[in-house]
Each structure stands twice: as structure tokens, then as C-alpha cells.
Amino acid sequence: MAIGKDRTRRNWLLSAPALILLTLAAAGPLLIMVVYSFLSPGQYGNVQWIFSLEGWRSILFTEDIFEPGKYTLADAHLTILMRSLKLSLLTTLITALVGFPTAWFIATKPPKTRVLWLFLITIPFWTNLLIRTFAINEVIRNEGLLNSFLLWAGLITEPLRIIYTDTAVFIGMAYVYLPFMVLPIFAAIDRFDMRLLEAGFDLYASRLQVLRRVILPIVKPGIIAGSILVFTPSIGAYVIPRILGGGKNLMVGNLIDLQFGQGRNWPLGAALGMTLLVIVMIALAVYTRVTNRENDRG
Amino acid sequence: MPNKIAVEARNAVKVFGQGDTSHSALNDVSISIKQGEFFTLLGPSGCGKTTLLRLIAGFETPTSGQILLDGADITALPPNKRAVNTVFQSYALFPHLTVAQNVGFGLQMQGRPKAEVKATTAEMLALVKLDAMADRKISQLSGGQQQRVALARALAPKPKVLLLDEPLSALDAKLRKDMQIELKRLQHETGITFIFVTHDQEEALTMSDRIAVMSAGNILQIGAPRDIYVKPANRFVASFIGETNFLPGTTAPGGVRLDCGATVAVDGSFMPGKVTLAVRPEQVRVQGAGTAGAIPAIITNWVYFGTDTHCYLVLSDGSPVVARLQSPAMGEAGLEIGASVGVTFAPGAAQVLKD
Amino acid sequence: MANASFSASRLPGFSTIATIVFVMLYAPIVTLVVYSFNAGKTVTAWEGFSWRWYQQAWTNDIVQDAALRSLTVATCAMLIATTVATLAALGTTRTGPFAGKTLISVMINQPLLVPDIVTAISLLIFVAALKVATGYQGLAYLIVAHAAFCIPFAYLPIKARLESMDLSLENAAADLYASPMQTFRRVTLPLLAPAIIAGGMLAFVISLDDVVITSFVKSGGQDTLPTYMLGQLRRGTEPDVNAISTVLLCLTVLLLSLFFVLTRKRD
């Protein structure tokens, strides 16, 4: 039922302070960034107010230094984009693979202990990302806990070189974002009617069949929600690759940062930022479509 | 072969929990259910009837004892290896599947050929008169329709025994009556053994071939509905099934001497001492005061029920008695509250109960 | 009986995976906390218990300065975000559809959808222009930026609480001659208070945790604890970062426990 004019005005007035603040410090700057992506870079950073598509073009192509007007694929950018996609997808996959059993484990505990397990997964969820990245760094760096243990146990003679590799970034992201996967899957399993399991077994399904044919289809929305919650920050990761990738194994976030630092190419940085935003929006659109379809069917 | 045994429980014991917190849900229960029988487990909540059903289905493993299906020990078999199917209390229909997919699920899991799954599903949907709903989502069905899908789904794999766990409890009174008739029809048409769990004594009496009355983890009496109603084995059965007047008394030559002083003739022999006499309200007659052999009583109240009128009386020792009379008879007698009357029991109606 | 009891919800291997997950989740954090008390400098050798790194961090002027700034920004951002989020929640829940309802909801949730780094550079661009235009370099930029991205975190618990609150209580108050303002102060606000506090705590934690947006918005010499730690990390690890991390961790656990208590449904 639609509401009257007075109520509509009241609702807008109540929401106004939040909207003004968000326009000022979120939506507005985002629009300015779009404008900046179509300008020319200034010599010492910032921009010159001359329209240019160079920022967008340099995402994928570099102009030949000797032959102006000749463009070649920007391999460095492409590598970074592909690495971001690859690592984010891998992170999403591994967190889903171990997150689902973990969520199931928590959800099938008796109510009293379930709260405790849930609390244990919630603490890392809210703990400073920097602290957790730092903690995993202490484990995997050359003189870190893992190598010390393996050397002490005599399993290796040389320290494993994990830190400052793609693997390090992958481990770090999986470690940091795992709680983001577990919580929505837990919420889905928590709503799941456990009596359906007995119905499945009663109708001659094996455990694997019950998992595939009954559990997974019903908790799928939770897994998709978790995947979005993991994929989105992974693709936009900045701190984790900066600490664990050691300045070499950049991801899109670091490439953007670079354009505002040494690169002094703000339009490219803005265009890359827009690209990242578009990737996230596509992921969200897919999520919305899938969940809507589920709702239509359910 | 109507007397072949379909399901048997031998000395089944189920204890939940351990140590101080443990509680016994079934105490050494043995039962034999015949093939093609409509068998009902009847009792109040917590009596162990659902536990016994879950032992047969395989959802619980007995603490000790055995479960046999067609003479074979299935105690250690998981539910997906037992040729029994369950109609769940809450139906437990798969929300992500259509009506037809739900019905075909068991057959698919058994690895039956596609054509057979399709044909049997159609046959089952026709049996429960849901042919037109095959492609609907479960959430689009009414409670009664969901009930039918649950039935069709459990019958589709043609189980040796169908287990029904209070399947009608979620339906309203009118739908319940229809489904009771429907269930009897399905059982008759399929010839499958039905084990039906309910706490509703009326449901049990109208539908069953035989009833097992349970209480606190024990089976108190097994028998045909009529036997259990007419000759309840003890006070619990008598009070749980139908209404009963309980009159305290002591044994006397030729019958029981009630505490109010009157003596009632009863059949059979019994241990001398204090006993309780059970008389169904419809077996109580109210006559004029001073009628020969009648027990003096005073009418305290009466309640009109349409065809019946319940007449509440009190004997001289203060024992309450209810008589269920046909309404016209009541009116003709001109019985009023406070009137002194005489009470008699129909011949053979009074049962002596062990407490 | 020898045969294991049948359990419908048991899935083989799941408990093992979950156990490993919990161990892996906590091992690094526990190590970090334990070694913040190590007398020695490394995480590999335990040289005895010591408060050394806590003392070193505590007596470090730069750390004190950063800590104070973190708390100032987080407190201001929390107060602003919680106030505007409460108003917005009152305007968008328990009401029928109205023109722009979806727009408002998208705006409020926007900080959750946009990656940190994108918000950070867009703010950098905007704030850089403002700094040139106004000449003001102060803490207000950080506070406003933090307040904005904290809004959705403050908004969610308040909205959830409002949606579960029956309008009949307010109607009953009105029936008993309370004016709309009296109804709000005497009925709505007290019922909403736990959610407002919970939302405020989430906003506080989120502000305290931020490193990306702060790095890009702050002026020179405006380090918060996280940006200070990030800078330290680049220069090689000093165990006083462990000590600061442990303190922040304890603060998070404390606030989170309070949050759990406040939002727990009263049976």
C-alpha cells in the first residue's frame, strides 16, 4: 500500500542527513572519479582539464614510445588483471570448499555449544584485517613459524619461499576472507529443515546423494552469498597483496594505488577504479539474478 | 497369506542420553505386525510410539533388541537400505523439487529406469488424485495437497511397510475426516502394511485393524478396536480410549460391592480385595428412584449435545457418574437437576480393572 | 550394541575439515598474541615472558599520537554515523512503499558494495581538490569519510530491531494520550536503545579497523594506529606491532561480546 504525501516527506527528511553524508563522502566522489577518468594526467599527479580517453585506453594498451599512434597490449596490466581474477576465484573456491563443511559442523551442534562456535567464527570476521594479515605473515614468512617448524621437524632443509609469491597472497586472502564464506552458509543451513535429511535417507538416497540432491540445492543461495562476500573484497584487495605480495605480485588494487603514487597517472587510476567497480557490479548482478530465480522457483 | 508377519520388534529397548541425563523411551517392547494390516500405535505424547516407528524406519538404532522385516534382521541397516517408507508428521517434502520430482525421488535413488520412474510417478499421482498438480512447487500446495504428495512419495517405491507419523495432525477437522477415509482406501488398494502413529483415540478406533496402546515406553494392550474399547486391560487404557466411569469398590460374592453400598454383578473371576469398576457412559441407564436393583443417585447437571445428552449424577458416597442418554429419552423422563433417581448398568457392561 | 547409531546429519570428513579450519584460523592469531609477550624479538624463539613491547609501544610518542587520533576519529564517526543511521532507519522501516525508497536503500548500502580501494581513490581525488580550495588540512576529512562508510553498519542492527518491533506499542501509547514526541521518547527510543548501542559499536569497530581509506584521505602526519602499523610493517617487523595488535584484538573481542549480549533475542 502506498503511503501519503506527508509520510513520504517525513521519510525523506529523516533519511536526509544520512543521504547528504553519503553523497558528500561516497557517491559524490565516485562521480568525480568518473569525470577524472576522462581527463589528461598532470605532470606531477592530479589532472589537466583536457578531455582524453587515454586513461581508459591505457588499461589494456600502451602507446609505442617510438611510434606515436601505435598501440600494443599492455602485458603488465593484463598480467595483473588476470592475477587478480585468478586469485580471487581461487580464494572463492577454496573458502567455499572448506567453509561449507565448517558451517555444517557449526549448524549441526546442539544449540548451547553452537553459539560458542559461532562466536569463534565471528571474532575473526570482525578482527582488523591488518592484524590478521600480519598474523598470517608471521606464519608463512621465511623465518616464520611454518618454516621454523618444518626445519625443526627435519622435513625441509631450506626454508620454503612462500612469502612474496602469488601463493602467499592466495593463502592470505583465503585466511582473511574465510569467515565471510562461513557465516552466510551457516545462516542458510540454520534455516534448512533437518527432517528433509531423514526423508532423503528414507527414500533410499545414500549420504552422497543426500548431500548432492537435497542439501546442496537448498543451501545454494547461502553458498552464492558467501561467494559474493569473498569474491568482492578479494578482487579489490589492496592490503593483503601489498604485505604478502611484497610489491611484486600486484593486484588491481595495488595497480590503482600506483597510479596515484609513482605512476602519477590519475586518469588511468580512476579508469582502473571504475573497471574494478564494474567487475564487482557484474558479480552482484549475477548474484541478484540467481537468487531471484531461486526465489521464483522456491 | 493374511497371517504372515511383516514387521517384528523383539525386546526393543531405547535409552536416550547417558548417565544421569538418560531417559528410557522404550522398555523392552515386543510386537508383531501382520502383512497387509492397518496397525496403529496409540498413546499420549512421550509414550514411545514415535520412537518405535523411528526404530522400524532406521532413524534410530535400538539400545538393545532387534527389528525384523519379513523375518530378516534389519536392526543394523541404515534407513536407505530398508524397504520401508515414512510419511512424516511435517511431510518433509523437498522444497526445491516439483510435486512429480518429489514423488519420483525414491525411485530415482533406487536407480530405476527413467521410463519406470515417470510411469510410476504418474500412477501414484493419479492414486492420490493430484495428476493436475505434477509440475507445481510444493509451496503452491494446500496442506491437504501436501499430505497427498507425501503419501504418494512414500508409496511410489512400493515399500513392504508404510510408516505414518501422525500424518493428519496438521490438518483441520473436516480435512482430517476426508483423509482418514482416503488412507483406508489407499491401504485397501495397495495392500501395503500400514503402521500408523497417533495420539487421537477416535482416529485409531475408526481406522485400525489392530491397535497397540502405549504409555511410558510400554505396550499396555494390543487388540482390535472393539476389544480394546469393550475390554480395556487396565485403568490407563480405559481412560485413554473413550470416556469411562470409574467406581471404587471391593469384591463380594457374585460381584463387586461399591463404596456406596450397592452390589453390581460382574462376569468372570478375579482376585479378591479392592477393585475399580469401569462402566462406559452409554451403558449407564437412569431410571425412576426406587426401581428394583437400581443404585440411588442424584442428578447434579446435564449438558445437551444434540442427539445425546450427558447426565451428570452423584452416588451416595460422592462418586460421580456420567450417563450418556439419547436426548428424547431424557426429555420424556422429565429429569431435572436435583432429582433423586436410580442408576443401572447394561448387562455385562461393568468391567473389573486392576489398578 | 556394536553398530554406531544412525545420524542423519553426519557427513563424513566434515568435522575433521571444520576442526582443521578452526585450528588454522586461530593458530596465527594465538601465536601473535603469545609472542607479543616474548622477551626476544622473533616469533620463532620464546625467550621468556615480558611486557617489554607493550612498554615500548606505550612510551612511543608516535604510537600514542596515532592511538589518540584513531580513538578520536572512531568516536566522532560513530556518533555521527549512529545518529544519521537511526534517523534513516526510522524513515525507511515500518512504512509502506514510497517514491525513492529503493534509492535510499541503495545509497545507504553503497559503502558495502564499493571496494575500499575505489572509495579511497575517489575520496583522494575529491579531498585533494578540497584541500587546495579551502586550505584546510585537518581531521574533519577523515571523520566525515569514516562516518560515511560506517553508516550501513550502524543502520543494519537498528533497522532489524525496528522491523521486529510491533507498531501496536506506539499505538497503545498514542491511545493513552501520549503525543508523537512523547511516544518516541518514552516508548520507541527505550525499545530501540540496545540496537542503537549495538550499531554504534559496530561503527566504532569498523572505523578503528580501516586502513585503506584512511591511508588515502589523511594529510601528512595524520597516522592512525592501522596506518602506523602498515608503515611499520614495510620497514620490517617490530614486535611492538604485535603488542598493539593484541590490544586492538582484545578491544574487538570485548565490543563483540557486548554486541552479542545486546542483540540476543530476549526469550
Image: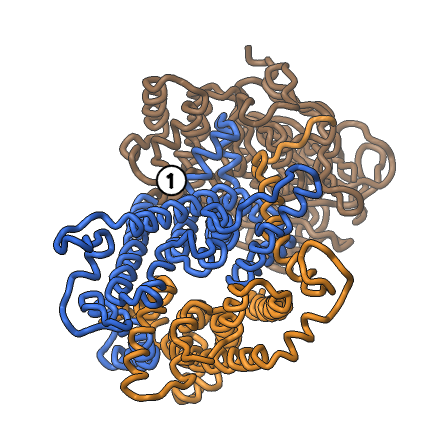
Q: Residue furthest top?
A: B1
The tint of chain B in the picture is brown
The answer to whether B273 is drawn above or below residue A285 in the figure is above
Residue at left offset 76%, top offset 42%: B18
Residue B276 horizontal/vertical position (percent): 77, 41
Q: Quadrant of residue C266?
A: bottom right
For badge 1, the amino acid type reads His
Relative to the observer, which residue lies in front, A53 or B269? A53
- What residue is drawn where x is 40% and y is 88%? C181
Identify the residue at image location x=84%, y=41%.
B274
- Identify which residue, B342 or B233, lies in the foreground: B233
Q: Is residue A183 visible?
A: yes
Q: Colour of chain C?
A: orange
Left or right, residue B318 beside residue C98: right
Left or right: B148 as drawn, with respect to A160: left
Residue A22: horizontal and vertical position, in percent?
33, 75
